[in-house]
Amino acid sequence: MKLTDHEKALADGTHGPAKAKAIDLLMRYGEALGAERLVETNNVAGAFNASTPSVRELVKKGFDAVYSELNLDSAEVVPIPKMVANTCQLITGIDNDNWRIQGIPEDLAVQQKAAEKHFGGLGINMFATCTPYQVGNVPVKGEHCAWMESSAVIYCNSVLGARTNTEGKESTGAAALTGRIPYWGYHIPENRRGTHLVHVDVEVDDIMDWGLLGYWLGEIVQEDVPVLTGKMKQPSLIKLKHFGAAAASSGGVEMYHVPGVTPEARTVEEAFGGNKPVETLRYGPAERKIAYDNLNCATERKVDFVMLGCPHNAIEQVWLIASMVEGKKISPDTQLWVHTPRALREVAERNGYVKMITDAGGVVMSDTCPAISRHAPKGTRVIATDSAKQAHYLPAILGLPVWFGTVQNCVDAALTGRWNGGLQ
């Protein structure tokens, strides 16, 4: 791997042992991927926390030990300096305010708060959300990033036109200390071109239908780059957020193009960059039903738990839910959790949306989700959600059946305790 003079100085320890370990990790990582060099980055989104039972013993050695082992893959504990790249914390396993409702042990909640204080002091911004682009981290077109979290990565690449691969704790930990990441994959312009042409033959407008389209598409194209045309109405941030999360869950899609919408595809021809599609696909009523059937594994109509907000809800989504439950009461046999970034929860509190939801018997949570925390309300047997991503993961993670549908379907289930949704 070709290194700059600064990178050589990092490697020989001139800038300290932590950065030496970080650049060594990135060099080994890059060489395994066939990268010829590193590229500068000033935008890192990773996981720098201590919210799981498995790190209890590690925390006793100090938070430098936590970073060394989890973020640098180093058994040797080295002192961790401040970050050199703009860095933010992604979603965690614990809501610092509602951990009791989650069912989190108190020692883990205390441990997490102490970790946040420590890592925040190193320059890691505690956004604690899977949607950092909703609360201030909005890279520009062409900017090289080092991001974790599949739904964030696909949004970063596709909607913002920034450049990142799906990174891990170790590579983001190293990137935060060095401002470098291997130059491979979606950092390279040629790899961002479309591979599959997708004709959408049924109207796609609401969040549920964008989720169904994404879920079907991910299963088909896996890790390739689809280019979508057809009966899709102008999407919003929210709809593209749900589409990308679904495609990244059922497959490994990290980038897509919607000509006339996404920044690297003014036309179909530009999306493919001179290449011909390797395959042309059609999405119609039959494919839509396949996606719906694959996402709905529940059979019992009685619903114990309704989860909304994966990826984390935008403020207008919180308002929509609040307006639907205002003046009503959640069924006594059902719990409603609404997830949104902490920064947006503060806005929702100021606007009165949180009170509207809590007065109805719901809970507005931040920082986490059931798939990450691996916690649902005690006694939950059946879950309902508007998230294709949660519907995909929760049966495996929590061993519980899930209904997937519209926000209205889910709110109705929370109010009545029963699932009455279906494919229209």
Image (cartoon, rainbow, N blue to C red):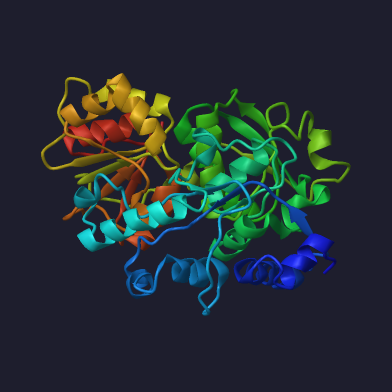
**Marker count (numbered):** 0
Looking at the image, residue 372 lies above or below residue 314: below
Q: Which residue is drawn at 30% across and 35% down?
A: 410
Where residue 210 appears, as percent x and y from the top left, is: 52, 35
For residue 105, say whether it is visible: no
Q: Which of 11 and 72 is in front in this view?
A: 11
Where residue 304 appears, as percent x and y from the top left, is: 20, 46
Q: Which residue is drawn at 68% across and 54% down?
A: 179
Looking at the image, residue 43 lies above or below residue 237: below
Name the quadrant containing residue 204: top right
Looking at the image, residue 98 lies above or below residue 176: above
Quadrant (top left, top right, bottom left, bottom right) of the C terminus: top left
For residue 17, say whether it is visible: yes
Where residue 404 appears, as percent x and y from the top left, is: 37, 43
Quadrant (top left, top right, bottom left, bottom right) of the N terminus: bottom right
Left/right placement of residue 177 relative to residue 335 reads right
Where residue 69 appears, as percent x and y from the top left, is: 50, 72
Q: Residue furthest bottom?
A: 75
Q: Which of 260 and 291 is in front in this view?
A: 260
Q: Residue furthest right?
A: 274
Name the quadrant containing residue 50: bottom left
Q: Which of 225 and 204 is in front in this view?
A: 225
Q: Which of 238 and 149 is in front in this view?
A: 149
Q: Which residue is drawn at 63% across and 34% down?
A: 200
Left/right placement of residue 158 relative to residue 356 reads right
Looking at the image, residue 17 lies above or below residue 394: below
